[in-house]
Structure formats: structure tokens, C-alpha cells
Amino acid sequence: MALSLKVVAETSVFDYLRARFGHRFAPASLAPNDSGLPHRFRGRPVIAQPQADVTTDGGTIVSEALSHRRRPNLPIIDLGRSVFAPEETQQFEREAASFTQDYRMATSSRSALLTSDGEIELAHALDRKMRGLLGRSLRFRLVAAGSCGGCEAELAALSNVVFDIGRFGIQFVASPRHADGIVIAGAISVNMREALEKTYEAVPDPRIVVAVGACAISGGVFAESEAVLGGVPPSIPVDLWIPGCPPHPLTVLDGLLRLLGRLEDSSTPSPNRA
């Protein structure tokens, strides 16, 4: 009986390996025009037709991701608050806002996530000294500080055969002592603040902080709750802001590679130049 079970187990392993080699999946392309994203994918929003006659009293629109300037009275999109829901664009007259297929949205500052024309300044590379210390690799400790699990699922997908983040020398590790920085997901619940800050302090200097998803950036749909901080606290400086609810693996990968200086273009095109 033991021998027969062993044969079955070995056969199953070989069958699995044979099937895996037969998949022949190439890693996803990082070219914006060749990413293979489905038609239903909602990427970077743009202002397709700015409205000069839109008025506002300063109130919120849907999740407060889309709001207006008083002057010159044009729409502003806050990618840090957006959950990329169709309802967010339907609040504008004559469909002034729309979603594109562009997944490139990671920035180096919170303010860069605010745009009135669809153009944003993408993340820039770490300084030369920092990159010299890190070499060509990054090790991160993931901190789920009060999230629904969506961002963690997309981060886990980065390690599969489609995105294969390991080919770029980027890995997630089990201990902050072995990490170059932390990746934060979730709206940062009040009960998780101390754990988050201690994890950050446990990472050796110099350290990198990446905020992933609308919740980590601004609190997302939970921003008004008393149980959350509404994003990463000021005590933890953030080096990379990655919007989305949750962000697509390509959005995360694009931001991390820009942080390492592997990608050079610094901004996304506005609708007028696309």
C-alpha cells in the first residue's frame, strides 16, 4: 500500500511539472500599449472635455475622489481617493471624466496624485547613493494594517508566472529586519498604528515606504470611519504612492521599477497629447 501511494504521488508531481512546462506563459509586458489588459480594465482617469460651466459649493462627489476647483472651475481628479468606479465619472456633465487603459499611476508624492487634465508626474528614481546601497534589488515586508485583502491579493499575484516580480530582484520577506522597506496596505486601523510604526522602526536605515491602494493613501471608502487613521500616519514618510482599489499588479510593478531607476519617462501624456 505504501509503495502504491508513493508511485501515485510521484506520478502526480510529474503530471504537474509536465502541465506547467506546457503553459508557456511569457511574463506580462510593461509596454503601456502592449500590456494585454482586458477592455473592461479601468486605468488612469482623464478629463476628456473640461467643463467651463461646472459650478460647485465645495461639497463632495461620490467618494470625494472627483471634485472641482473654484478657479478656473475645472474638474480635478484625486487618484489617491478614487476607487475607479464608473459612478465617479458619471457625476460630470457631458462625461468630462473617463477611464483609460493606462496603468501607470504610481507617484513619488501625494500631491502628484491630483490632476486637472489627466497628466500626472510619475514616480522618480531614488537618489544615486540610495540605489548604490540597495544594488539592483529590493526586499519588502508587507504590513496589512486594516484592509479588505484586495491589495494583498494583487501583491501576491506579482509573484506568479505572469508578472514574476522576482526577475527584477524584488521580493517580499517575513521579517522587517531582513527588509529594505515596508509595503503598507489598508486604511491603517487605530489598533494597527503601533504595530505599523514598530515594523517601520525595525527596518534598518535607509528604508523605503510604499503605500499601496486608496486605503493606505487616503483611507479609501473607510476614510470617514473613526476606526481608521485615513491613510499612512505623518510619522511614517512615504516614498512611493500607488493608487487603486486595488491597484493592478502592473501598476505596482511599474512604480517599483521607477523607484529603482529602471524606467525613465517621467509623466503620462495629457489627453491633448495622447
Image (tube, rainbow, N blue to C red):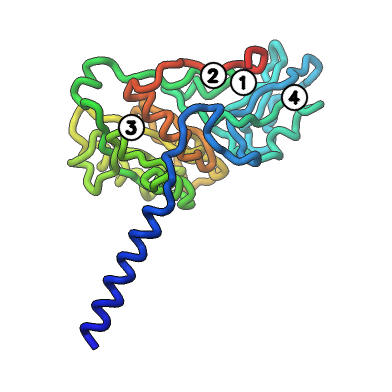
Q: CA distance from mark 3 to mark 1?
A: 26 Å
Q: Quick check: marks 1 and 4 in contact, CB under 8 Å?
A: no
**Most foreground residue, 184 or 263:** 263
Residue with the mark numbered 2: 268
Mark in the foreground, 3 or 1: 1
**Most foreground residue, 129 or 160:** 160
The reply to whether residue 33 is in sight is: yes
Q: Quick check: marks 3 and 4 in contact, CB under 8 Å?
A: no
Q: Decide which of tag 2 and tag 4 comes sooner along the chain.
A: 4
Q: Residues within 10 Å of mark 1 (few under 14, many from 20)?
A: many
Q: Amino acid at mark 1?
A: Gly
Residue with the mark numbered 1: 118
Picture coordinates of residue 254, whole percent (x, y): 43, 29
Q: Decide which of tag 1 and tag 4 comes sooner along the chain.
A: 4
Element type where label 1 sits in the image: loop
Q: Decide which of tag 3 and tag 4 comes sooner along the chain.
A: 4
Mark in the foreground, 3 or 4: 4
Q: Quick check: marks 3 and 2 in contact, CB under 8 Å?
A: no
Q: Residues within 10 Å of mark 2 (few under 14, many from 20)?
A: some
Q: Is residue 3 above or below residue 193?
A: below
Picture coordinates of residue 20, whole percent (x, y): 38, 56
Q: CA distance from mark 2 to mark 4?
A: 19 Å
Residue with the mark numbered 4: 96
Q: Amino acid at mark 4?
A: Ala
Mark in the foreground, 2 or 4: 2
Q: Decide which of tag 3 and tag 2 comes sooner along the chain.
A: 3
Q: Residue at x 73, y 18 (%)?
A: 50
Q: Residue at x 53, y 27 (%)?
A: 32
- Residue 205: which quarter of the image? top left
Q: CA distance from mark 3 to mark 4?
A: 34 Å
Q: Decide which of tag 2 and tag 1 comes sooner along the chain.
A: 1
Residue with the mark numbered 3: 209
